[in-house]
Structures are given as C-alpha cells and as structure tokens.
Image (cartoon, helix red, strand yellow):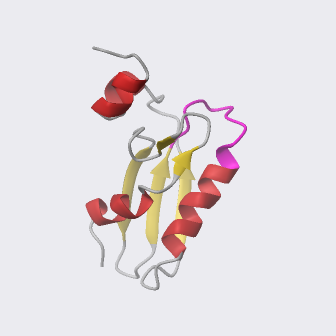
Amino acid sequence: MYTSEELLEKLEPVIDPELDFSVVELGLIYRIYQDEEWVVHVEMTLTSPACPIGPSIGKAVQDTLLSDPYIPEVELKWVFTPPWDPKTMATEEVRWAMGIYT
C-alpha cells in the first residue's frame, strides 16, 4: 500500500491548466489515502467552486492514479470547506510566482 506522501508524488504531474502549477503544489488535495482494499480516496478542491475545468482536472487525477497497477479504484470527493486559499495552501514557490509574499 502507498502512503499519502507517495500518492501525492504520483499526482505531481497533474497540472491546473489555468494556473500552470501542479494540483499538489497548489494545495488542492486536502486528503488522500489508500484503504485496506487498495482503493485510493481523494478529497480535493478547486481554485473556485465554479471552475469550468474542474471535471477535467478530476479526470486527470483519477486517470493518473489508475495508471498504477496497484490502484484498482479511485474515489474522488470534491470539497469546498475550507475554501482554497493560496496564501496558506499553496507551496512557497507557487505563492511567489503568484505575487503572494506573505
């Protein structure tokens, strides 16, 4: 079974096309784990609840994880509480690139 950190590493290549950063770097993955049946559970958000590319980002997350032979299923749950805040959720590199210097 994979750890949460290993699962996040697998999602590094999934890019939010509007911001051109990884969903991991942006802090959009709130929780990820693999259960005893090897199913991966992902709780994630979007930069905005009305994000028009949300479905394609979700599909990319699922497809990326399902490409691993040890992941038979992915359960993706969209969550919007707490709302995404790049000041506290994005990596330092992303914050600097976005002009957030706090």
Residue at 46% in and 30% down: 84
Q: Residue at x 53, y 75 (%)?
A: 66
Snapshot quadrant of residue 4: bottom left
Given residues 63 and 93, the one toward you in this image is 93
Position of residue 21 relative to residue 89, above or below, is: below
Q: Is residue 52 left or right of residue 59?
A: right
In this view, which residue lies farthest toward the bottom?
69
Q: Left of 1 or right of it: where is 24?
A: right
Q: Quadrant of residue 46?
A: top right
Q: Where residue 33 appears, x then y in whole percent?
A: 35, 64
- Can you tell which quarter of the image residue 10 is in? bottom left
Q: Residue 54 colored magenta?
A: yes
Q: Is residue 76 magenta?
A: no
Looking at the image, is 85 positioned above or below residue 73? above
Quarter of the image with the N terminus in it: bottom left
Judge whether 102 appears above or below 64 on screen. above
At 43% from the left and 59% from the top, the residue drawn is 11
Q: Which residues are magenta?
A: 45-55
- Choose between 52 and 32: the one closer to the eye: 52
In the picture, the quarter occupied by the C terminus is top left
Q: Which residue is drawn at the image coordinates 32% and 35% (left, top)?
A: 91
Of helix, strand and loop, which mostly describes the magenta segment?
loop
Residue 51 locus on image (x, y percent): 67, 34
Q: How many marks?
A: 0
Q: Nearer the viewer, residue 85 or 67?
A: 67
Q: Is residue 87 above or below residue 66?
A: above
Residue 12 x %, y %: 41, 55
Left or right position of 44 against 36:
right
